[in-house]
Image (cartoon, rainbow, N blue to C red):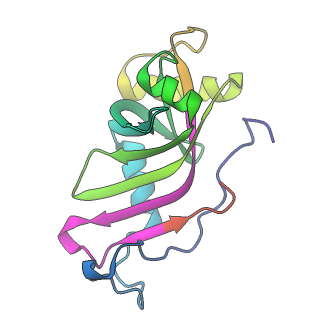
């Protein structure tokens, strides 16, 4: 499958977020779960995306980046020589968390470098109006990444634990 065609699978049926029993999550009913369209809107409109990676010796690293929800996945850029870039080269597993702790979206997956000119063009075209700067895919200081998500969790603090929602993507 080419990078251009490497889009995420369709949205599976949501389930409840996996948390210990003491959190009070009612797994017997889907009532009150976060709608997928709401999650997509949050991922699309977010300004900062917190990317969590792991250093080779196991210590975690987290840093905010500007990014996009593009082609059904989180996309961002970072210098391959940055801590994030080096961590992802050694271990591509990562977590992306949006800004809010009240309207939570957490993306778990694997980051992959993007080199396909068509995808890079769409990235630059979408990034420019959002951030008023156009990234240069030919600049070696830019590494472009797509997070191939396996799990996305979401909830709202105002109606937690009723809103806890989890989507598991088996083909991601």
How many numbered marks, from 0 up? Answer: 0
Reply yes or no: does residue 144 show up in magenta: no
In the displayed structure, 104 sits above or below 167; it is above
Reply yes or no: does residue 162 show up in magenta: yes
Residue at the spot x=53%, y=31% of the render?
88
Q: Which residue appears farthest toward the right when viewing the image?
A: 1
Looking at the figure, which quarter contains the N terminus?
top right
From the viewer's side, name the closer residue of 24 and 59. Answer: 59
Q: Position of residue 143 (x, y in %)?
A: 55, 20
In this rendering, position of residue 96 left or right of residue 117: left
In the displayed structure, 37 sits above or below 45; it is below
Query: Which secondary structure class fits the magenta region best?
Result: strand
Corner quadrant of residue 106: bottom left
Q: Which residue appears farthest toward the left when viewing the image?
A: 158
From the viewer's side, name the closer residue of 55 and 79. Answer: 55
In this rendering, position of residue 146 left or right of residue 32: right
Image: magenta residue range: 145-166
Corner quadrant of residue 53: top left
Residue at the spot x=46%, y=34% of the render?
57
In this rendering, position of residue 14 left or right of residue 165: right
In the displayed structure, 60 sits above or below 134; it is below
Looking at the figure, which quarter contains the C terminus?
bottom right
Q: Position of residue 50 (x, y in %)?
A: 35, 39
């Amino acid at each position: 499958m080419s990078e251009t065609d490497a889009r995420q699978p369709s949205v599976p049926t949501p389930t409840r977020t996996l948390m210990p029993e003491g959190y009070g999550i009612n797994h017997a009913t889907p009532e009150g779960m976060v709608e997928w369209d709401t999650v997509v809107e949050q991922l699309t409109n977010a300004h900062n995306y917190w990317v969590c990676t792991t250093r080779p010796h196991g210590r975690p690293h987290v840093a905010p980046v500007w990014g996009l929800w593009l082609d059904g996945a989180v996309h961002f850029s970072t210098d391959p020589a940055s801590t994030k870039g080096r961590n992802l080269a050694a271990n591509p597993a990562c977590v992306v968390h949006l800004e809010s702790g009240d309207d939570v979206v957490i993306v778990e997956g694997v980051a992959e470098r993007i080199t396909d000119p068509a995808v890079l063009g769409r990235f630059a075209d979408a990034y420019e109006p959002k951030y008023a700067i156009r990234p240069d895919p030919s600049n070696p200081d830019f590494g472009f990444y797509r997070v191939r998500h396996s799990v996305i969790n979401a909830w709202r603090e105002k109606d937690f634990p009723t809103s806890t929602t989890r989507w598991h993507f088996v083909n991601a």
